[in-house]
Image (cartoon, helix red, strand yellow):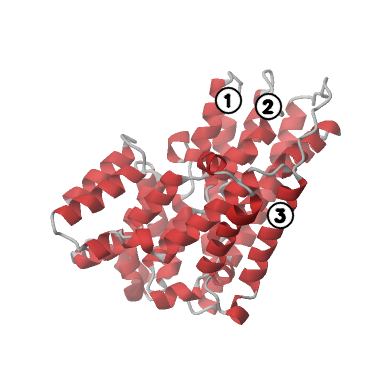
């Protein structure tokens, strides 16, 4: 427990990159003979590791194409309205959520699209555009399996039998109601943000002729073909019976064989820290199980079982409140790992699937109010601060509260659906 507490403290205060505490922890427990090597390092040769590895290669290839630059060029050339620009950012972020597993990676890829639209004298427009950028790249990331590395960590924490049920389409089906609720609220919020920005500040017309992007037809169309094959492989998995991890890894290797992407290009686009972090924390569950700490953690929260026995909705409410409080102190990824490790073993006693508990933790813990709570929000605020762009913190905070409430509403709306799927 002391070693785990030390890792959490380093995560909370950001003393080192996120992957360092997890890697240090598994090295120490192996050197001290607390956990067998095959358990501590199993994350580095697990299916989850290779699945994320392949997806990151595909994401790196997408970043090397000119599709996003083409969209930016068309918006600039046509002097698109502010509402059109907002929805272009939204559509791009949603599309990238399907294929880029890192919220920070998606935000970085969309960032060039919003830089042209930020103004030195438009605090309201800057504020609303930052809201769209941040939440469009993060809000539905837990609804789609490939939308967030933490989704893969949750899959890795589940038993093999349960894990098979929640592959790509199974995950999407179970999270479908939450996805619909979040999508409706997101579209409405973007429309509201565009209306407020347009009303507060007049739109400028571009005084320059934008420079057309450099087209790469072979790589661009090859990338679309790769993702088309991936989509077909996902939709026909029940027919070909090939695990998703091997489909993704094969396509990732095809990138090197046929796309001509260089290692230097991949190094700049590949999220190695996230991959190492995922590999280290996937082993937390098995390590705690081996040390019999999972049972100990379960015994420390008997009051939560009492709430669930009294009422399912009351139990969910207490769980959500606890997650929000923890997230005020602990960053998103460590908070999820800690809470999932403690709560997943209780799923059977509560009478629900471990995936449901994990999804609730994922969805709520990915919410945020202040910049330090999420990397994408911090990244966007840092951009505007660095370029001395004015914005209204209170206006952004109001939307953050709205989207946190939307996450909670999506959980409650999903309960009848989960009952129909026999997950509760």
Image coordinates of residue 245 in percent, x first then y, are: 51, 66
Where does label 1 land, which residue? 384
Residue 127 higher or lower than 26, as above or below: above
For the residues carrying marks 2 and 3, which lies nearer the camera in this image? 3
Residue 117 higher or lower than 330, as above or below: above
The residue positioned 35% from the left and 66% from the top of the image is: 344
The residue positioned 55% from the left and 75% from the top of the image is: 242
Does the rendering let one see residue 413?
A: no
The residue positioned 56% from the left and 64% from the top of the image is: 250
For marks 2 and 1, the one nearer the N-term is 2
Image coordinates of residue 17 in percent, x first then y, are: 36, 39
Per the image, label 2 sits on a secondary structure element best described as loop
Where does label 3 land, which residue? 222
Which residue lies most toward the right here?
A: 78
Evaluate if marks 2 and 1 touch, with contact meaning CB atoms under 8 Å apart. Answer: yes
Between 383 and 282, which is closer to the camera in this rendering?
Answer: 282
Image coordinates of residue 416 in percent, x first then y, are: 55, 72
Q: Quadrant of residue 67?
A: top right
Query: Callout 2: 10 Å neighbours few (<14), some, many (20+)?
Result: many
Residue 392 higher or lower than 368, as above or below: above
Q: Quadrant of residue 348?
A: bottom left
Per the image, label 1 sits on a secondary structure element best described as helix
Q: Which mark is residue 118?
A: 2
């Amino acid at each position: 427990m002391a070693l785990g507490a030390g890792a959490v403290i380093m995560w909370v205060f950001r003393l080192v990159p996120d992957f360092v505490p997890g890697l240090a922890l598994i090295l120490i427990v192996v050197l001290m003979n607390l956990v067998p090597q095959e358990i501590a390092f199993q994350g580095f040769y697990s299916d989850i590791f290779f699945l994320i590895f392949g997806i990151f290669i595909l994401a790196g290839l997408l970043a090397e194409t000119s599709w996003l630059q083409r969209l930016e060029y068309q918006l600039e050339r046509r002097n698109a309205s502010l509402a059109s620009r907002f929805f272009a950012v939204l559509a791009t972020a949603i599309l990238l959520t399907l294929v880029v597993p890192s919220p920070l990676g998606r935000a970085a890829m969309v960032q060039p699209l919003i830089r042209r639209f930020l103004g030195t004298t438009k605090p309201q427009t800057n504020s609303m555009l930052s809201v769209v950028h941040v939440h469009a790249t993060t809000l539905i990331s837990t609804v789609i399996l490939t939308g967030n590395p933490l989704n893969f960590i949750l899959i890795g924490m589940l038993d093999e039998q349960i894990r098979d049920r929640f592959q790509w389409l199974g995950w999407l089906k179970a999270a479908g109601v939450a996805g619909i609720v979040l999508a409706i609220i997101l579209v409405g919020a973007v429309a509201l943000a565009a209306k407020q920005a347009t009303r507060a500040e007049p739109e400028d017309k571009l005084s320059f002729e934008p420079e057309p992007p450099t087209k790469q037809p072979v790589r661009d169309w090859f990338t679309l073909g790769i993702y088309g094959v991936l989509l077909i492989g996902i939709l026909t998995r029940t027919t070909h019976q090939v695990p998703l991890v091997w489909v993704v890894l094969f396509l990732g290797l095809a990138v090197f064989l046929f796309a001509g992407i260089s290692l230097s290009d991949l190094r700049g686009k590949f999220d190695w820290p996230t991959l190492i972090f995922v590999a280290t924390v996937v082993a937390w569950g098995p390590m705690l199980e081996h040390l019999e700490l999972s049972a100990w953690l379960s015994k420390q929260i008997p009051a939560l079982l009492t709430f669930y026995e009294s009422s399912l909705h009351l139990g969910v409410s207490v769980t959500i409140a606890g997650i929000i409080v923890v997230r005020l102190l602990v960053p998103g990824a460590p908070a999820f790992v800690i809470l999932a490790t403690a709560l997943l073993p209780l799923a059977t006693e509560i009478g629900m699937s471990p995936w449901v508990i994990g999804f609730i933790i994922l969805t709520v813990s990915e919410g945020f109010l202040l910049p330090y709570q999420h990397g994408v929000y911090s990244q966007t605020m840092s951009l505007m601060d660095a370029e001395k762009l004015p914005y209204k913190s209170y206006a952004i905070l109001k939307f953050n509260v709205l989207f946190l409430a939307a996450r909670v509403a999506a959980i409650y709306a999903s309960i009848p659906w989960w009952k129909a799927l026999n997950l509760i």
